[in-house]
Amino acid sequence: MGSRLRAPAEFQTKQEILINSHYYDVTNWIPRHPGGKIIKFYTKEGEDASAAFDQFHGRCITKVTKFLKQLPKRDAAMENPTQFSPENQSREGNEVLLNQELSLLKSTFEAEGLFTPSYFRVFLRFMECLFLIIYGIYLTHCTSQFVKWIGLFTTSFGIGRCGWFGHEAGHRSLTGNIKIDKFLHQLTFAMSIGLSPSWWNSQHNRHHAMPQRLKHDVDLETLPLIAFNKKVIKDSKLGGIFKNNFFIRNQAKLFLTVDTFLVVFYWRFFLHPRYVIKKRAYADAVFMSLHHLILTSFLDPVNIFIIHFLTAIYLLGTFTLNHTHLEVTEEEKSWVEYGLEHTVDITSTPLTDWWMGYLNFQIEHHLFPQMPQYNNHLIRDRVAALAKKYDLPYQTLGFWEAWGKVFRNLEEVGNHVASGGGSLAWVFPNFETSYVEWDYTLNPTMEPFTFERDYTNLSFSRKWWWENSYLVVQIAVTYIIGIFGLAWWMKNRKPYNLRKELFVWNLLLAVFSAVGWSRVFSEFLDVISGPNGFHRSVCVRDTLNISSGFWLVVAHWSKLAEFVDTIFIVLRKRPLTFLHVYHHAVTYVLCVSSFVQGEPINRYYGSINFLVHTAMYTYFALSAIDYKPPRRLAMCLTAMQVFQFAFIMGVHFYAIGVKLSGQLCAISNESSSVTLMVSISYFVLFSHFFYRNYLRPNLKSNELKT
């Protein structure tokens, strides 16, 4: 908007900020700035920190102004009078005039008492949070499953309400007392949600200073899970790594059900703890530890998981309404322009105000972040008049209209990536550019069965999974949630016997695996015994007979059926291990994603996995009818599992070596790297299981559970 302020050339190498027509040298102050490195944004040429200084430091303006006088400064108006002359200020878009009008409005609002907090409101909101969490946890201990679910929703909602309360405390607009607000921020943000208030202060200030500005607003840094704008994809320094990201292609479908939980999980268990350790934020560490201590003392892991899942949906879902669907910018803009052009209000109703914690008045909140948020509705008309005076937008959307814009924007960016746009690269490639037809060739050593020959639409199956790849992750997440939900339902119930059913199920899977192995291995043996056979079996798409093609399709569907294994464990109230759930969920996602790539290395998965499962399910079938196989047999089965993953790792190392040498190999970098990482995790986990059950001395024999 209009002309931008420029420092004289000889001073442009200095770390200076412009505040109210004076340049202050902050070179030595930047590392000690309590608000984080946001101050560096305003040391760049053309930036004016006047409004940000005034709005961020309103509660301590006397102290900060006194400190500011101690810094070296120079008079910008004296050095460049034309920038601050009345004639220049009268032109449309003059930032100095906008800042003066904003300052005048703030003084008016202060005189009207709109910056004065209501301690009674603070007390009511705090008691609301406390009541919802305590009462919700109490309900989770009732015998009625219906009441327990009400308790889970109530607890989740209470923690979400603490998020709104803590947000206002972080802005020091809650009580107006910085020390009290800081304590309440730690109490409601760290202890209730489990996140670091110090991290929030440093990062959220960046968002407020320059919302929707690339490389400045931390809320745009959501890769690789979410991209709120096409420009984020092109601009991101991760652009060369995350091409054709599965999550971003399907982000409109995954946003609420998957992405929100993964983001908060990453924050809670990695990003924020790392920040606390790095910054030595000991108070944050204590309150965050209390969060986990309280939850684990009163709730079991399944309930904690559900509460975290629901809280993430409430908090992150609501956060997206005011900014994410708006345009991003790389331009220097004034505080007022950022607040008006890159923010929208949500239409006020009593329910919307309460649900969003008054953050539906987002424009007013961005212009005056230290005003108690329940007063924001009282200044809307005057803010709208300011926008109209300078021909700036004042945008308002209905609650559901805003949700519609959020999802249409997510869909639009996802489609842009799916059509080959952007510069992202991750696990699942874009098959519009990498999909390869793999023609059948009959293996003369094996005549296909009729049902194998009739099923000739392998390409259709691969393409269907490609087009609906988002279902893979959703099914895996549903499996995890469903299993833990079933375990919770079984908590106070007697275990089911199910021995006959378990025997039949395991016997069917054993027979299925044996037939599958006999059909796949024959083609694999024919390829690997030919000229340069090992290399062809890994890197060359030169043969795939009808029988192998059919059984590779069915094998990947069988990974979905194997979820029933876990249902038997839960219904019989046998120990449900992390290894079991992790192995089943990740194997399903990995198998389907590798299947749609149509890579030659798939024949290794089929041959080895069918063989191992033939032995494993035979063992389980015998165990279900009280036949106790020798302990050494169980030991051999686990050893087969470990060997399977070691062999797969070796094959992938070979494929990577071939590609690094500059030769061609029909396996994508993404597929190879991800499968290798998963195989390594399996190898470590199954090796630990093997050692714990068969090699560690003085350990009682345990029944094998894989």
Image: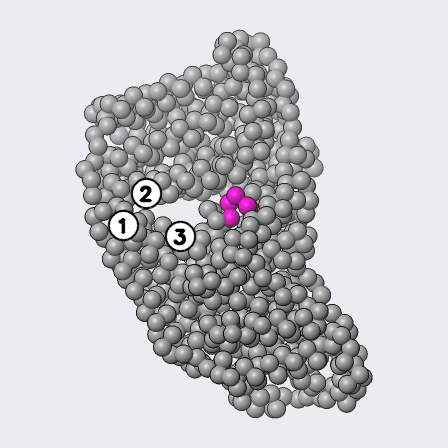
Magenta segment: 251-255
| Image height of 497 relative to 447, above or below | below
| Magenta stretch secondary structure, dominant | helix
- Residue that numbered label 3 is attached to: 310
Based on the displayed image, in which of its 4 quarters is residue 513 positioned? top left
Residue type pointed to by label 1: Lys
Which mark lies nearer to you, 1 or 2?
1
Number of residue marks: 3
Residue 650 or residue 448, whichever sits in front = 448
Q: Which mark is residue 56?
A: none
Q: Could you tell me residue 425's position as x and y percent?
A: 62, 45
| Image height of 594 relative to 256, above or below | above
| Helix, strand or loop for disc 2 | helix
> How far is the residue under mark 2 from the one under mark 3?
14 Å
Q: Could you tell me residue 82's position as x and y percent?
A: 81, 84
Residue at image coords 57%, 16%? 456
| Helix, strand or loop for disc 1 | helix
Residue type pointed to by label 3: Leu
Residue 640 or residue 423, whichever sits in front = 423
Q: Could you tell me residue 305's position as x and y percent?
A: 36, 51
> How far is the residue under mark 1 from the one under mark 3?
14 Å
- Residue that numbered label 2 is attached to: 485
